[in-house]
Structures are given as C-alpha cells and as structure tokens.
C-alpha cells in the first residue's frame, strides 16, 4: 500500500482558504471572546480594583529664568526634571507652610505631577487625591510655595501661577474600547495561527485528490451530503456510476482483454487458447460481486439511496438490480466470517466519511484489509459538503458536459442526422 506523508503534499492555497472559511466562526468567536476578556480585564483593573474615585486639579505656571546672570540655564530643565523638583523638600517645605495641620509631606509628594511641556517656560502642574477639597487645598498651597521657591533659588527670577482649575473627578475605564480592539486583534491572530497549525496537522479527505495522492487506490466517486445543489449531486452521481461500472469489470492483470491478447501475441504466447483462458477467468471473476467496507458502522445505510442509484448504473451487485441487498456491507472491526466473505468476493470498496478524521481512519482500515489479504478496489467519500466542492472546482465545472443537439444541415434534429460537438472543457459548441 503506497502511502505519501500528508505533510509532504504541499500547500493548496484554495483548499486551505475553503477549510479556513468553513471554520471562520471559530476565528470570529475567539476574536470576540478575546476582545470581551481584554475589555473586562481593563475595567476590572482600572475601575473595580482601583479603589475610591480620584479628583484632579489642573494648574499652569510661568517660569522666569535669570538668563542675564546664568545664560541659557533653561536648557538644563525639562518636564521630567520639574516633576522631580516638585517633590523635593526645597519645594514641599514652602508648600507645607500654606497647608493646614493633618496633611503630611507624603500626601503632598504623592499627589503632585508635571505634564508634558511644549514650552520650557510653561509648566502644567496636576494635583490628584481621593478628595476634591484636599486636591484644591494642596493646589492652592503650591501657588504660595512655588512663588517662594522661584524667588529663593539661583537661576530663576520667579514662578507665577497663571491658572488653577476646580477639582474634577477622574474618569476611569475610558480606554476600554482600545483594550477591546487590542484583544480582538490578538485573539484573531492567535486563532488564525492555531487554525493554520491544525490545518497542517489535518490529514482528512476533503477532495478526491487528497486520497489519490496518498494511496494507490482510486477514489470511485463522491456522494454529496446536501439536497440543494441538484446539479452537483447529479454530476458526482454520474461519476460514481461510471467508475463503479468500470471497477466491477473483472481483473485480468491488464487494462482489457484486447490488450491482454495483443501483448501475449507480441511475446509469442498469444494463442486462441490463451485468450479463451483469459475469458474464462474473467467470467469467474464477473460472478463475484464487490462488497462495501465501512469506515464506520451505518455509512452504507446512511447513504443507501445514493449508493443504490450508483449500483443501478453498474454491476456492483452482480445483478444490476439497483438494490443493496446483494451488496454486503461490513464495518470494521470485521468478524472472521466477514473477512472470509470479503476475500472470496470480487474485492472491497471502502466507504469513508468526508471531512475531519477520515484520513487516520482510512489509513488504519486499509492496513487491516491488507493484513486480511482483502483486495481493495477503491474508495467512496460519503457526505461531502456541496458548497465546498462547488467553491473549489468552480460553478462552471458542473455546468459543462450537457449535450445539446446541433441541427443538421437539412434542419433535422434527430439523433441520426444531428451532431454534438463538445469542447475541451466539456461545453458544447
């Protein structure tokens, strides 16, 4: 039994896209779940676990540098420098002089911060605490403290307060949308990578070519699982009937009795007796109907009508009766008497479910059939997704091959005088 490693088959981009689209709901669900989780985690940290609400006072100060005495001293200052200076004892000691008792230096230092400075001479100062009155009190104390500090330190000519706004409640959770967007993106990426890895590890059969490229047995046909795409069902049904009729022909070791006789003649062994022997062998083989080997119990029963229609157009049951009653179906694990019956038959046709899991199942059962010395004549994929096949092969692939009579020169449309021209793609000319 030839077996090609499925991960060596190469990447079929269209097959991958269709398999991905079949599970696009997984990607959407993971992305939506990740977005909800990220937003929920952000709100939990910033709202629920952040403690009491905060109140913020915004103020602005104009800084005057003594450039005449110290030159370009302002080049030594920036937002980070002023942020650290506002928490030093040189500043806080002046601020404490304007504060009532009960407010500590630690509270003052924790509350103050300096924002980004677009101009080194304009300093935005922010006071943030859990109490609106306390924030406003500290902000007013900084007005007094920075005035004293600006006139006491070398290099500065003073610091004037231009603006002190009333305390405002700090809104929390304002970046929930951003957190959700980040979660959505990361979740979708993780889901896509996971689906790509799963695709690479998936050895299932979605196309006839998947099975044919991996094993030496032919795929006799595909049974579609839906009822809406009548054209596809008829198309693949016709294929199955044709292929079953071919594989039901007796095996002679050559493609035909004619070729058998011709090859024997060329080697000097072709005689009328040899041809007669071949025909006798063919006759004995023709009396042995094929049987069905089910990859899982009930496949033959589940697709009974479709299989019966295919049998009707072939010699699978030996009678061309269109009934499965004479065509035995066996599901693995086979009993000893079932295996013997299959060995005595004209061969087994393996019934495989289409889609997930069919690859590992096929490999296992083919190995069992090989060990039981049961001849395998081919496989049938059951329950294929019609939309998948239509999208992969293209809608036009199932519209060709319909023969329309072409009027003869005398205008007659009867079969004897008419002619039918078929293009290479199966369409009529």
Image (tube, rainbow, N blue to C red):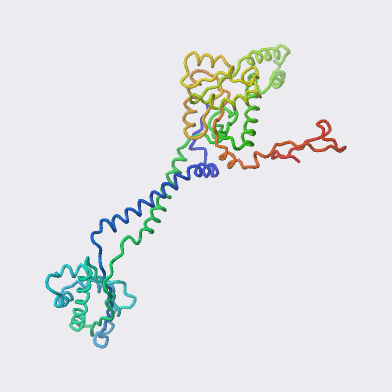
Q: Tell me which residue sits at (57%, 40%) in the image.
A: 387
Image coords of residue 121 (percent x, y): 30, 80
Q: Residue furthest bottom?
A: 68
Q: Position of residue 296 (x, y in %)?
A: 48, 25
Residue 217 spot, x, y in % from top left: 56, 27
The one nearer the camera, 301 or 63, is 301
Label total for image? 0
Taking the image as drawn, is residue 366 in sight?
Answer: no
Drawn side of residue 178 relative to residue 152, left or right: right
278 left or right of 194?
Answer: right
Residue depicted at 86% across the width and 38% down the height: 411
Position of residue 251 relative to residue 353, above or below, is above
In this rendered view, identify the residue nearer to me: 42 or 93. Answer: 42
Question: Image quadrant for the C terminus?
Answer: top right
Between 109 and 370, the one nearer to me in the picture: 109
Which residue lies at the image location 22% right of the left edge and 67% below the top edge? 129
Residue 29 sits above or below residue 401 on the image:
below
Residue farthest to the right?
Answer: 410
Taking 7 as reference, is 128 left or right? left
Q: Position of residue 344 (x, y in %)?
A: 56, 14
Q: Height in image: 416 above or below 106?
A: above
């Amino acid at each position: 039994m030839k077996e090609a490693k499925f991960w060596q088959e190469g990447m079929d981009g269209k097959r991958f896209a269709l398999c991905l689209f079949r599970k696009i709901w997984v990607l959407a669900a993971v992305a939506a779940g990740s977005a909800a989780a990220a937003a929920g985690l952000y709100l939990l940290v910033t709202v629920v676990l952040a403690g009491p609400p905060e109140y913020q006072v915004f103020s602005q100060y104009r800084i005057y540098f003594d450039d005449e005495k110290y030159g370009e001293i302002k080049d030594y200052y920036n937002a980070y420098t002023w942020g650290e200076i506002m928490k030093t004892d040189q500043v806080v000691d002046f601020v404490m002089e304007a504060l009532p008792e009960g407010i500590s230096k630690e509270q003052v230092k924790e509350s103050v911060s300096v924002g980004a400075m677009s101009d080194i001479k304009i300093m935005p100062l922010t006071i943030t605490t859990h109490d609106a009155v306390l924030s406003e009190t500290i902000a007013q104390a900084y007005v007094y403290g920075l005035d004293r500090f600006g006139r006491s330190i070398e290099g500065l000519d003073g610091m004037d307060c231009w603006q002190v706004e009333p305390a405002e409640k700090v809104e929390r959770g304002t970046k929930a949308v951003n957190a959700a967007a980040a979660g959505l993106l990361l979740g979708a990426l993780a889901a896509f990578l996971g689906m790509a890895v799963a695709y690479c590890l998936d050895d299932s059969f979605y196309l006839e070519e998947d099975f044919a490229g991996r094993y030496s047995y032919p795929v006799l046909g595909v049974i579609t699982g839906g009822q809406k795409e009548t054209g596809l069902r008829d198309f693949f049904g016709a294929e199955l009937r044709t292929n079953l009729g071919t594989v039901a022909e007796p095996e002679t070791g050559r493609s035909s009795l004619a070729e058998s006789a011709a090859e024997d003649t060329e080697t000097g062994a072709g005689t009328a007796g040899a041809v007669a022997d071949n025909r006798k062998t063919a006759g004995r083989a023709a009396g042995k109907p094929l049987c069905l080997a089910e990859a899982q119990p009930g496949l033959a029963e589940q697709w009974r009508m479709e299989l019966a229609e295919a049998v009707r157009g072939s010699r699978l049951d030996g009678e061309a009766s269109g009934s499965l009653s004479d065509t035995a179906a066996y599901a693995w694990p086979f009993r000893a008497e079932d295996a013997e019956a299959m060995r005595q038959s004209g061969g087994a046709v393996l019934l495989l479910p289409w889609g997930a899991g069919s690859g590992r199942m096929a490999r296992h059962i083919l190995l069992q059939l090989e060990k039981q010395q049961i001849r395998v004549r081919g496989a049938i994929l059951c329950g294929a997704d019609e939309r998948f096949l239509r999208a992969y092969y293209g809608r036009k692939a199932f519209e060709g091959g319909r023969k329309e009579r072409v009027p003869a020169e005398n205008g007659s449309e009867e079969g004897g005088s008419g002619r039918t021209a078929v293009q290479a793609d199966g369409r009529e000319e």
